[in-house]
Image (spheres, rainbow, N blue to C red):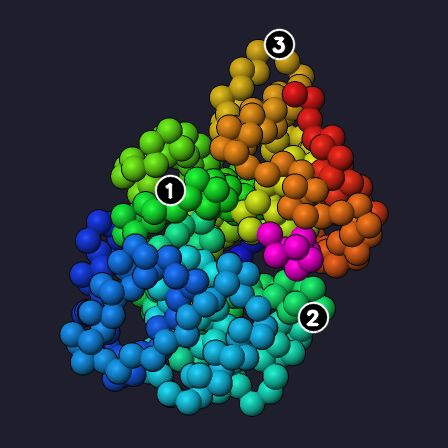
Amino acid sequence: MKGLFTYSNPVRVHFGEGSLSRLGEELDRFGGTVLMVYGQGSVKRNGVYDEVVGILKGRGKRVEEISGVMPNPTLEKLREGIAVARGCDPDLILAVGGGSCCDYAKALSVSVHCEEDPWDRYFVRFQEPDCEIIPVGCVLTMSGTGSEMNGGAVITDTASKRKVAHIFGDAVMPRFSILDPMMAMSLSGYQLSAGIYDTFNHICEQYFSGDDDCVSDYLAEGLMRSVIHSSEAAVTDPTDYEARSNLMWAASLALNTLISRGKPTDWMVHMIGKAIGGYTDATHGMTLSAVSMAYYRAVMPHGLHRFSRFAQEVWRVDSEGKTEQRIAEEGLDRMEEWMRGLGLVMRVRDLGVTEDMLDALADATTITKGGYGNLSRDDVRSILERSFRGRLSSL
């Protein structure tokens, strides 16, 4: 492995059916006021809300609430939450929901006592917090983002159409996360598929970088094979606990920083996807799937050896008698076939992107280095157009 790195992940995870029973002991570590953050009603319909509130009140907690956190949390919603939190002075922010609620809770945790404008400090200048940080806990009801085990927070400014991620350090990571796969059983097929691809692409973004023999790549290949296997089982039978539990844990491992150690990492699919999300408010996992094939086919020639390895180790492509180019192409063909089988969105136009948006989306995309393409703004524009027109593959 190349490079010098530090690895730390302080999040305590309680995993498995019935793990919500561990919430009470976690609550005892914090003061008397809990600010509960949740989404747009699903936790009330599936009974999770009542269970959590019952545990909170059973431990003698004063419960305050912020409801209506949307799938792509907005700056306006963050400012609303800051006002609520300043009014109740919570000892813990408890996110009950999917990755967006977890993201929102972390953004709120560093904003309540921030003396500057939080958007400018954290999402424009990318500075770290120098104020008091309110502890965060998570009760996860949808897997995919990995937000329950990292310091990331993504907020969208609808006025400027900018969707921005800030990856905070250990102090902002959740103090604990409760992952019960049964809580995710009520997800729609669309949400399930979006979460599966979010997980898979997180692994790809780290895997498609570097050129050395790296332990992280072997871990990534195993995770990808597990996601593929479990996704097919879960789509066939959405009540398959084994498949759903494997997908939930894979999502956490995909973005808890473990498999990025020793890697330069890429993240260009996410940068393009975030630009699309800022303009369309589309589901995050689907913004990634819509541009992935166009992107990976564009950068494959620059990382041919890694794409060939991906084909053989993840998709089990037979290499006998084939050129490295052909092996790599077959791997991406199989990936595309799997994506279509999951019902993923494959064209940006199906997310509400219009042709007259393409230039603005290219301009809004942050160019990162670390992957195989070293793209220009015009390259991004070309990838967006290929996705828009559906020119994705040799299938």
The residue that appears at 51% across and 59% down in the rendered structure is: 71
Residues tagged 3 and 2 counted as in contact (Cβ below 8 A): no
Q: Is residue 10 left or right of residue 346?
A: left
Residue 22 seen: yes
The range drawn in magenta is: 274-282
Magenta stretch: dominant SS? helix
State the count of labels.
3
The residue that appears at 49% across and 21% down in the rendered structure is: 316
Q: Which of marks 1 and 3 is nearer the N terminus?
A: 1
Q: Three-letter amino acid code at disc 3?
A: Gly
The quarter of the image holding the C terminus is top right
Q: Which residue lies under the disc numbered 1? A: 247
Res 322 quadrant in image: top right
Q: Which residue lies under the disc numbered 3? A: 321
Q: Three-letter amino acid code at disc 2?
A: Ala
Q: Earlier in the sequence, mark 2 or mark 1?
A: 2
Q: Is residue 240 left or right of residue 358?
A: left
Q: Earlier in the sequence, mark 3 or mark 2?
A: 2
Find residue 144 and report its horizontal and vertical position in percent. 45, 49
Instruction: Name the element at disc 3.
Output: loop
Residues tagged 1 and 3 counted as in contact (Cβ below 8 A): no
Please, is residue 334 above or below residue 6 in the view?
above
Q: Three-letter amino acid code at disc 1?
A: Leu
Q: In front here: 124 or 12?
A: 124
Q: In front here: 136 or 44?
A: 44
Query: Residue reaching furthest left?
Result: 58
The residue that appears at 43% across and 40% down in the rendered structure is: 189
Q: Which residue lies under the disc numbered 2? A: 159
